Amino acid sequence: MMALGTFLRKPPLPPGSCRAFWGWLNAVFNKVDHERIRAVGPDRAASEWLLRCGALVRYQGSPKWQQDYNALPTGPLGRYKIEAINATDSCIMYRGFDYLDGLEHVTDIRLEKCMYIQDQCLQRLSETNNLQKSLQQLKIISCGNVTDKGILALHKLANLEYLYLSDLPGIREKETTFRVLQQALPKLELELDLE
């Protein structure tokens, strides 16, 4: 009997295989569905993407944060416009940032503890024409893959009024980076909590 139990026991998973599985699944969640964007509009499609990845959205005129994918409001195409995004602990990544292209009313984004956010994401964010016009507040907290290069890329967000940066160990040239950013965006209020 003992030999049968030993024989039926599953071999241990190779190191890192669970992490690889979750990385693959998160990449699937971030895949952009352009047909869906055309069918339901950019705000609805972006809401679905963000909630699928664990983020929250708030619509114009509403104080309530949407967090349940199955409870997203329905209504006529274009009725609900995303005003704020809270991506705390979410799995959003560069691959899904095409969903941001059609958003015209986003004024506030919070990226906190987002393990897939990196310089390339901030560059993409700052190159999104609609966000260059609408985004006023941005908070980047505990995103370990963000470096000076990513922060400097934010200079294209012409209407950015407030930038909060905290716990970003990848930022090495703090004084130079922030001086250059302040010169590019003179109206920017920059709040730092970096060591």
Image (cartoon, rainbow, N blue to C red):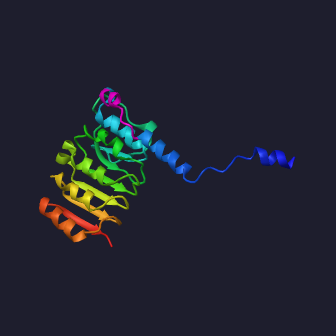
State yes or no: residue 87 in magenta: no
Return the residue found at the far right: 1
Who's the residue at 45% across and 36% down the image? 70
x, y percent for residue 31: 39, 37
- In this picture, is 121 found above or below 46? below
Who's the residue at 29% across and 31% down the image? 41
Who's the residue at 36% across and 39% down the image? 47
**Residue 89 seen by the camera:** yes
Using residue 2 as the reference point, say whether residue 9 is left or right of it: left
Near-viewer residue (168 or 191): 168
Using residue 70 as the reference point, say whether residue 117 is left or right of it: left
Who's the residue at 25% across and 66% down the image? 191
State which quadrant residue 40 falls in: top left
x, y percent for residue 195: 33, 73
x, y percent for residue 187: 13, 60
State which quadrant residue 115 falls in: bottom left
- Marks counted in the figure total 0
Bounds of the magenta span? 30-38
- In this picture, is 19 found above or below 29? below
Near-viewer residue (39 or 169): 169
**Residue 186 seen by the camera:** no
